[in-house]
Image (cartoon, rainbow, N blue to C red):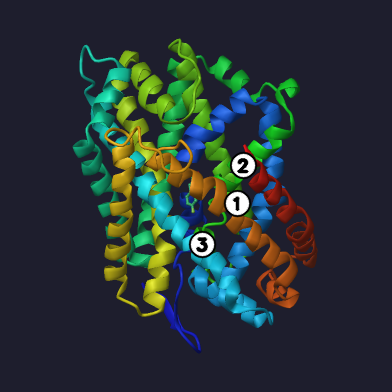
Amino acid sequence: MHSKHSSQINETISWVGKWTFVLAAAGSAVGLGNIWGFPYKAGTEGGGAFVLIYLLCILAVGLPIMMAEIIIGRRARKSPVNAMKNAAIDSGKTSNWQVVGWSGLISGILILSFYSVIAGICLNYILISASPAADVSSVEQFGIVTSSSGRLLFWHSIFIALNILIISAGVVDGIERMVRLLMPMLFILMLVMVINAMINGDFARGLSFLFAPDFSQVDATTFLRAMGQAFFSLSLGMGSIMCYGSYMPQNENIFKTSLTVAGLDTLIAILAGLAIFPIIFAYGMEPGTGPGLVFVSLLSAFVDMPFGNIVGPAFFALLSIAALSSAISLLEPSVAYFEEEKIVSRFSAAMILGLFAWFIGIGSVLSFNDWSDISFIGNLNFLDSIDYLTNQFLMPLGGMMVAIFAGWFLKSNLALDELSSSHILIFKIWKFFIKFISPVLVAAVFVYQLVS
Ligand code: PFF
């Protein structure tokens, strides 16, 4: 059933199922960052001490900004550009605040362009890990994959095509239907991987790597790194959550749903660590992060492991699903804007914007081979430059602006209306954090990332 009910000005779209916002937002939040970012940082930055600091960052910065994005999105029931504009105008402020929405749309497409290339490699690894080539080490295997621009382009194209397909089918028939299918699959696969780690891995060592608190590793930069991770992991500052929030039914409780999304995101990040590191230790490898951890170290563990040709593909399927449900949340905000402004139909918007991201992604494909020596920003190659521009610059800037806007410029009664299903105390605590705590802490991360 399509629940399209018309408001005075515009036709609005709404999630149909009660849990859909939670599933969609958790789908956006749970991505490559949870699986190859969080566990390694936790392990090397003080174990349990880092996990504790990370939780504090989620509560003090992530949760208030997530709530602010949903408040702004849901009250306008519009794409991030127009949601920011409406909120500003209704608070008697300049409509220029819409640049925050624009920045989200642009960074969404830019992140999608390289996220898709990496997700394409994950798709290819489902096949590779099912029948690993004999006599080829996992380092050589990664070299074979990344040196072929044709192969990378092929899988990048498949991944973008999946995104276009889902987004063009619509909010309810595309996104809602997909997250209802993908998120339970992701959760089950993750539990299977943790059980596998208990059986085939050095679980005790994995546990102590992740959780044994070591406060001697903690310094000021630990806080900043934990905050950066929390921010990226919750998909904040990009319009994704604001856009998904604009489809949230009016009777859903913003505080409870945000808390659930943040909780699920953290749970999956911890489970990922419990799935990966026991295996890494049992097979005598060094803990690492990023592509090297999954495409090299884990692949070689799967090759040696009993039933590795089943566990391996299941793991890379898990990674691909996590990436897909994040990627659609990067494309949706700009497609929503095109559709709402009646620039083109949803289908054409998904095609045009998807192909645009595909085209920029070619630069990231070439970063692995032909362009690997060409620098764009500083001495960074194309992929790393786009990554830097979005993750270190646009994302924290966007989040900071949302926090400043919601804390200092948004009329209190507008926010209060949206939080009316919670106790007044929730509103007061939220207001305090979004005004005094969150913007300052995000600003600290922003400045730190710029200078380091
Ligand atoms: N949160 C995703 C991850 O942890 O991999 C990445 C991401 C998705 C960031 C969507 C930003 C975003 F808007």
Q: Work out how far the residue at label 2 is from the one at label 1, CA to CA, in angstroms.
A: 9 Å
Q: Which residue is mark 2?
A: 449
Quadrant that contains the N terminus: bottom left
Depth check: 424 or 289 in front? 289
CB within 8 Å, label 2 to label 1: yes
Q: Work out how far the residue at label 1 is from the one at label 3, CA to CA, in angstroms.
A: 11 Å
Which of labels 2 and 1 is toward the front?
Answer: 2
CB within 8 Å, label 1 to label 3: no
Instruction: Determine crowd level at label 2: few under 14, some 14-19, many 20+ residues with C-alpha closer than 10 A.
Output: some
Q: Amino acid at mark 1?
A: Pro
Residue 152, position as x, y percentages in the image: 25, 38
Of the numbered discs 3 and 2, the one sitting upstream in the chain is: 3
Quadrant that contains the C terminus: top right
The answer to which quarter of the image holds residue 426 is: bottom right
Task: Give the side of residue 358 with respect to residue 227, left or right.
Answer: left
Residue 42, position as x, y percentages in the image: 61, 29
The answer to which quarter of the image holds residue 328 is: bottom left
Res 250 seen here: no
Dot label at residue 396: 1
Of the numbered discs 1 and 3, the one sitting upstream in the chain is: 3
Q: Amino acid at mark 2?
A: Gln
Task: Give the side of residue 215 with respect to residue 104, left or right.
Answer: right
- Residue found 54% across the figure and 54% down from its top: 394
- Residue found 69% across the figure and 66% down from its top: 406
Of the numbered discs 2 and 1, the one sitting upstream in the chain is: 1
Q: Which residue is mark 3?
A: 103
